[in-house]
C-alpha cells in the first residue's frame, strides 16, 4: 500500500477533482439534519447526479450532536469520496452536492437561519430511530424525553430534530415564507406520517396554532431508502486514498446497490431526481414494509445471532451455513407471508438481499447493526410477529431474532466477554437482565414488559412468551449457531 500520508488532501482546487457541473453555480435548496455516512452515500449521491441540470438543489448538512463531520469536511471544501465496494473491486467518485456542514451544537442560529431561507424548499433528515424522541411501540412523541423537555423549556434554542423543525416552521410562518417539505429518510414505518405526528405533537405542546399550521400546510412525504453503508474505518481511508490518489479524512464506503422510493408530494418543489434512478410513487407503503421486514428484520436477526456466535462482520455470519439457511427461511417461511405482492418477486428480492449480505468487500460490523435494538425491533420483527400471531401461524424464526436480542442485551457473550450494548434503554435493559439472573423465563418476562418496545398486546401473548423462553434456554445452553440450526428444522406453519 502506498504511503497515504504523502498524498495531497482532497480539495476543490485539486486538478483531479472533476465534477460534472460547475460547483460555484450550485445554490442550496435542501437542509439535511443528521449528515452521517448514510445520507452522504445515498441522498447526496442522487442529488449530485442531477445538479448539472438542476443547480438549485445543493445541500447544507447539519450534525446535531457532534462536530466531527464539519471538522473533517471543512478543510476539504465539504467534498468527499464515495467508494463503492464489491467482490469485483472498488470504484471511487467525488461528491460535490454537499455545500456546507453546520455543527448544531455551536452553530444553531446559523442552522435555523438556513432553515428559514426561502430558497430552502426541503428539510430532510437521517437522525436514526432514536433521533425522533418517540415511543417506538406507538410512534408517538415521548413528551418526557429529556431532550424534548429541554426544547419545550427553550423553544428558541432547540437541540432535537423535532424542536429544530418546529421552530423553523414557526419562524417561516411568522415571516410569511411558505413551509419547506419535511422528508424523513430514516428506517421508520410510514416515516412521513410518523414524522408529521411527532412534530405536530411537539408543536401542540407549545401552541395549538402552530400545530394546526403544521398539520394543514406542511407536507411530509414518506420514503423508502436503501443502501448498506458501514461505518468508515482508518483502513478504508487508506484504501480510498490508494484508489483516488487524494487524502480524504471523511470518505464513505458503500455497496453497488442503491434504491430510493419517494411519495411524490412536494408542494414547494423538488429536484428532478428521476434520471438519477429515484422512483416517485403515490404510495410508498408496500416498498417500505418489504424493506423493513425483509432487509432490516434479517439484518437485526443476523447481527444478534452472528455477534453472539463470534462473527464480527455480516458477510462472515451469513456465510455460516446455519445462519445463511436461517435467514433464508426467516424471510421465506415467515416474513414473506405478511407482505403484499407477488411471491415470485419477493423471492427474487430475498435472493438479492442474501447476495448483498454476502458482499465480501463490505466490512459491515454485526455490532453496528445491533445498536439501538429497542428502537428497531418494532418495525423490523414485531410487525411480522403480530401479523403471524393474528393468523395463528408459526413465529419460531422471527421469535429467534427477538430472543437473540434479549440474549444480547444481557451484556455478556457466549464466551463470557462483555458486550458494549449501545441503546438508549441500555441501562434499563441491563437492570432487567441482572434481576433475571440465569432464568430465561424471568428474562423474557422482564424484557417483554418494556412497553416502549412490545406495546400492550405482546406481553400478554402466551405463544410469543413460550417461543422466546424456549429459544433463550437454547441460546444460553447450546449457543446461537445450534439454536439457529434447530430453528431451521421447525415445520413451517
Ligand atoms: C442496518 C441498516 O444498521 C442497521 O440497523 O440494518 O442501516 C441497513 O444497512 C440499511 O437500512 C440498508 O438500507
Image (tube, rainbow, N blue to C red):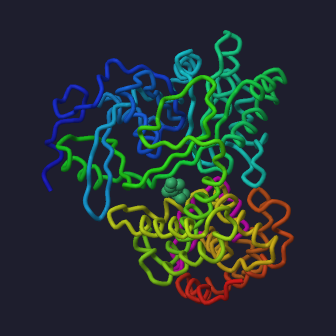
Q: Residue at x 77, y 26 (%)?
A: 216
Across and down, in percent, residue 209 comes to: 82, 20
- Left/right placement of residue 324 relative to residue 411 reads left
Q: As displayed, is residue 32 above or below residue 299? A: above
Across and down, in percent, residue 138 comes to: 78, 51
Q: Is residue 487 magenta?
A: no
Of residues 492 and 423, the one drawn nearer to the viewer in this rendering? 492
Q: Quadrant of the N terminus?
A: bottom left
Q: As displayed, is residue 359 above or below residue 467? A: above
Magenta region: which residues?
411-433
Q: Quadrant of the C terminus?
A: bottom right
Of residues 261 and 146, the one drawn nearer to the viewer in this rendering? 261
Residue farthest toward the top in the current orientation of the protein: 175
Toward which corner of the image does residue 122 lie, by quadrant?
A: top right
| Marker count (numbered) | 0
Of residues 147 and 281, the one drawn nearer to the viewer in this rendering? 281
Toward which corner of the image does residue 404 lie, by quadrant?
A: bottom right
Q: As displayed, is residue 473 above or below residue 303? A: below
Q: Main secondary structure of the magenta part?
A: loop
- Left/right placement of residue 122 relative to residue 454 reads left
- Left/right placement of residue 359 relative to residue 13 reads right
Q: Residue at x 45, y 25 (%)?
A: 57
Of residues 109 and 355, the one drawn nearer to the viewer in this rendering? 355
Q: Is residue 429 magenta?
A: yes
Across and down, in percent, residue 88 comes to: 26, 62
Q: Residue at x 51, y 23 (%)?
A: 107
Amino acid at each position: 500500500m502506498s504511503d497515504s500520508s504523502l498524498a495531497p488532501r482532497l480539495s476543490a482546487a485539486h486538478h483531479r477533482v472533476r465534477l460534472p457541473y460547475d460547483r460555484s453555480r450550485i445554490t442550496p435548496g435542501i437542509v439535511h439534519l443528521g449528515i452521517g455516512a448514510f445520507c452522504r452515500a445515498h441522498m447526496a449521491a442522487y442529488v449530485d447526479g442531477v445538479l448539472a441540470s438542476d443547480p438549485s438543489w445543493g445541500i447544507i448538512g447539519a450534525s446535531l450532536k457532534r462536530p466531527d463531520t464539519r471538522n473533517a469536511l471543512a478543510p476539504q471544501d465539504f467534498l468527499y469520496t464515495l467508494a463503492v465496494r464489491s467482490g469485483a473491486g472498488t470504484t471511487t467518485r467525488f461528491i460535490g452536492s454537499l455545500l456546507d456542514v453546520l455543527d448544531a451544537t455551536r452553530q444553531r442560529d446559523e442552522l435555523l437561519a438556513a432553515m428559514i431561507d426561502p430558497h430552502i424548499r426541503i428539510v430532510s433528515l437521517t437522525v436514526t430511530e432514536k433521533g425522533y424522541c418517540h415511543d417506538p411501540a406507538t410512534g408517538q412523541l415521548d413528551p418526557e424525553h429529556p431532550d424534548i423537555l429541554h426544547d419545550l423549556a427553550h423553544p428558541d434554542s432547540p437541540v432535537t430534530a423535532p424542536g429544530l423543525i418546529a421552530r423553523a416552521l414557526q419562524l417561516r410562518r411568522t415571516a410569511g415564507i411558505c413551509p419547506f417539505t419535511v422528508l424523513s429518510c430514516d428506517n421508520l414505518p410510514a416515516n412521513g406520517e410518523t414524522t408529521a405526528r411527532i412534530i405536530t405533537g411537539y408543536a401542540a405542546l407549545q401552541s395549538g396554532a402552530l400545530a394546526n399550521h403544521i398539520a394543514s400546510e406542511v407536507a411530509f412525504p414518506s420514503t423508502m431508502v436503501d443502501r448498506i453503508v458501514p461505518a468508515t474505518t482508518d483502513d478504508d481511508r487508506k484504501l480510498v486514498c490508494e484508489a483516488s490518489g487524494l487524502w480524504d479524512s471523511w470518505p464513505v464506503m458503500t455497496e453497488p446497490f442503491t434504491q430510493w422510493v419517494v411519495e411524490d408530494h412536494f408542494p414547494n418543489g423538488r429536484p428532478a431526481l428521476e434520471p438519477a434512478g429515484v422512483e416517485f410513487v403515490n404510495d410508498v407503503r408496500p416498498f417500505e414494509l418489504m424493506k423493513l421486514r425483509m432487509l432490516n428484520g434479517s439484518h437485526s436477526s443476523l447481527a444478534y445471532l452472528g455477534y453472539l456466535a463470534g462473527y464480527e462482520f455480516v458477510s462472515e455470519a451469513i456465510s455460516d451455513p446455519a445462519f445463511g439457511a436461517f435467514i433464508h427461511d426467516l424471510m421465506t417461511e415467515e416474513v414473506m407471508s405478511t407482505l403484499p405482492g407477488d411471491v415470485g418477486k419477493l423471492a427474487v428480492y430475498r435472493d438479492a438481499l442474501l447476495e448483498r449480505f454476502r458482499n465480501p468487500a463490505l466490512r459491515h460490523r454485526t455490532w453496528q447493526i445491533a445498536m439501538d435494538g429497542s428502537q428497531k425491533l418494532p418495525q423490523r420483527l414485531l410487525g411480522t410477529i403480530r401479523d403471524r400471531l393474528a393468523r395463528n401461524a408459526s413465529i419460531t424464526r422471527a421469535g429467534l431474532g427477538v430472543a437473540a436480542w434479549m440474549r444480547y442485551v444481557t451484556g455478556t457473550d457466549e464466551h463470557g466477554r462483555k458486550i458494549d450494548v449501545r441503546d438508549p434503554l441500555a441501562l434499563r435493559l441491563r437492570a432487567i437482565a441482572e434481576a433475571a439472573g440465569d432464568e430465561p423465563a424471568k428474562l423474557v418476562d422482564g424484557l417483554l414488559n418494556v412497553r416502549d418496545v412490545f406495546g400492550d398486546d405482546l406481553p400478554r401473548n402466551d405463544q410469543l412468551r413460550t417461543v422466546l423462553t424456549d429459544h433463550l434456554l437454547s441460546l444460553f445452553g447450546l449457543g446461537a449457531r445450534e439454536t439457529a440450526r434447530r430453528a431451521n428444522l421447525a415445520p413451517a406453519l
